[in-house]
Image: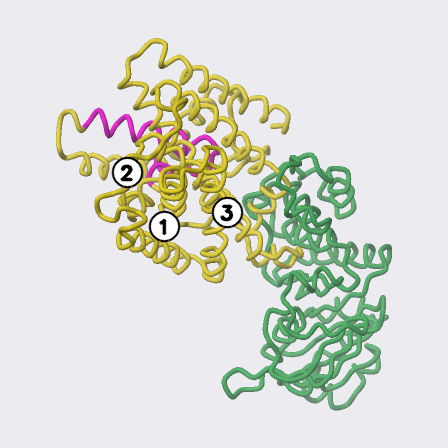
Amino acid sequence: MSPAIEARNAALVAIGAAAIFAAIPMFFGDFAVYLGAEILIYILFALAFNLMLGQGGLVSFGHAAYFAISGYALAILLTTYSWPFWPAFIAAIVLAGIAALVIGYFCIRLTAIYFAMLTLAFSQLVWAIAFKWDDVTGGDEGFIGVAVPVWLVEPSSFYYFALGTVLVAGTLLWVITHSAFGRVLRATKENPQRAEFLGLNVRRVRLVTFVISGTFTGIAGALFTLFNRSVFVESAWWTKSAEVLIMSILGGVGSFFGPALGAAVLILLDRAITEFTQYWPTVLGIILILVLFFLPDGLIGLFRRKRAEDGDELGDADPAPSRTPAE
Amino acid sequence: MLTIRDLGVNFSGFWALKDVDLDVSEKSRHAIIGPNGAGKSTLFNAITGYLKPTTGRVNLDGQDITGRPPHELVKSGLGRSFQRVNVFQDLTVFENIQAALLAHHSRAYDLFTPGARLYRAEAEAILEQVGLKDEANRVAATLAYGKQKQLEFALSLASEPKILLLDEPTAGMSPRETSEILDLIVRIQEAQGFTLLFTEHDMEFVFAIAETLTVLVQGRPLATGAPADVRDDPEVQRVYLGGHASGGKDAA
């Protein structure tokens, strides 16, 4: 598919999704707005995470770190130091990027499972700091009562702020994924040795990816603080990292929009199933097993398979991995 | 242009390479031959930054490149292809070349220009040159083995090397594929005027295209010279060529 058509299709998907999200506060009550905002935040988290996993082949098991660092930083700057909103918001995101740069500097020296373990170790370190540093973070009790600016207090105004932010950030991630850098990143994923012999500094490409991914994760983390008006130490706990990994796999890591779909589905399922049973983790386990066995391309693979049957090329926003070759 | 002095590689007590002195002159076709285990691949790995040599220096155009990482070597004009096929299997042929061109033109950190639109004409020109134009949109993994080797060669061309190291470019190929890729390599090398350093086990191939020959035995160079001279060297005859000597009758 030509790049122009691919961009047009992606724009259609984004505009369609944005229109649906934008309509929610007009037709539904506060609960739907609350749920919609949470989904939007996790969509951004998953998209940022998947730049590393899907595009770069880098399995991070510690993305909670950047989510939490930005979340705490925003809470502290707004409340403890009474910073104005925008400087605090931007500083929190930049801080997540800097943390990703420092942590990434060490992690990219390792590969595969060792890489994943080191990202996990660093994120547990972030958790430990948040837990122990009572005076600043509120420790075990959490950081409660964040000084959210007045214009964001109304649930629907926060909701539209989140929608706008996720739309802008998501567009930037799409552009980066399809940029010259994105192409090169895919090459380093497929064959790092050959990529080196094309003149690519594979470690540096990975570090840049790490920083971009951490920064966008920071945007999600900052939104999450505004959403809850508090930050809890669970934000940095490893299950948060696992959650975003599961969302990505569920939706499909080989596609740009897959993880976004995974995030929405996982949160909706969580809410729906918790209504009936306390065994949500069991249900989640079963869903994951089914996906891994029967849907290696994730839920988004269902759409693509259907499209292939219809002989219709529309809507494929994915740069290629599972494309069938033209004979 | 490539000067190697006293190069040695020691694997926990065993010298896989020792006392290697080698001068590869500009725009020449220089072959390294030797029996299995003679250290040909080790030599290539030591030159290309894949292995850190225990002793010795490697110079490219007067610049010391010993032990430098591959991506830096490529930037200073050294290209390499591999013995076993080493391409980007899940990308199309076109995307393979495009990725190589993006790397070569230092667009790796360009976050905003759409990658698919860059260097299309250049990629097409390279595919035309190596005869893969009709396969441009096929996923690399679906190509026949010989075509994959052609693609591998094309990837190396994209970085416009001053010297190209080919490790057994015809390994695993049918006789017809072998002669095709040979013609291709020589034609492009002559047109672009780069230096070619290659290892090869097919003697017929070596004598057909090499201008200089180095025989490597047990990690040490035994003789270097014009193919005909090396072939007639009594010691080379004794330890290596032996019964194959008559195979080189069509030497250049």
Residue A184 x/y as whole percent? 60, 46
Q: First in sequence: mark 1 or mark 3?
A: 3
Residue A27 x/y as whole percent? 33, 9
Q: Give the residue type at disc 2.
A: Leu
Q: Residue furthest top?
A: A27
Q: Is residue A168 above or below residue B174?
A: above
Stretch of the chain drawn in magenta: A246-273
Q: Which chain has been coloured yellow in this picture?
A: A
Give the label, 2 or 1, closer to the camera: 1
* Dot label at residue A288: 2
- How many C-alpha atoms fall within 10 Å of the one at disc 2: few (<14), some, or many (≥20)? some
Which residue is disc 3 drawn over? A56
Marks 3, 2 in one chain = yes
Dominant secondary structure, magenta: helix
Colour used to depict chain B in the structure image: green
Mark 2 residue element: helix
Mark-to-mark CA distance, 1 and 3: 14 Å
Q: Give the residue type at disc 3.
A: Gly
Mark-to-mark CA distance, 3 and 2: 22 Å
Q: Nearer the viewer, residue A313 or A127?
A: A127
Residue B159 x/y as whole percent? 73, 54
Which residue is disc 1 drawn over? A61
Q: Quadrant of the N terminus of chain A?
A: top right
Q: Quadrant of the C terminus of chain A?
A: top right
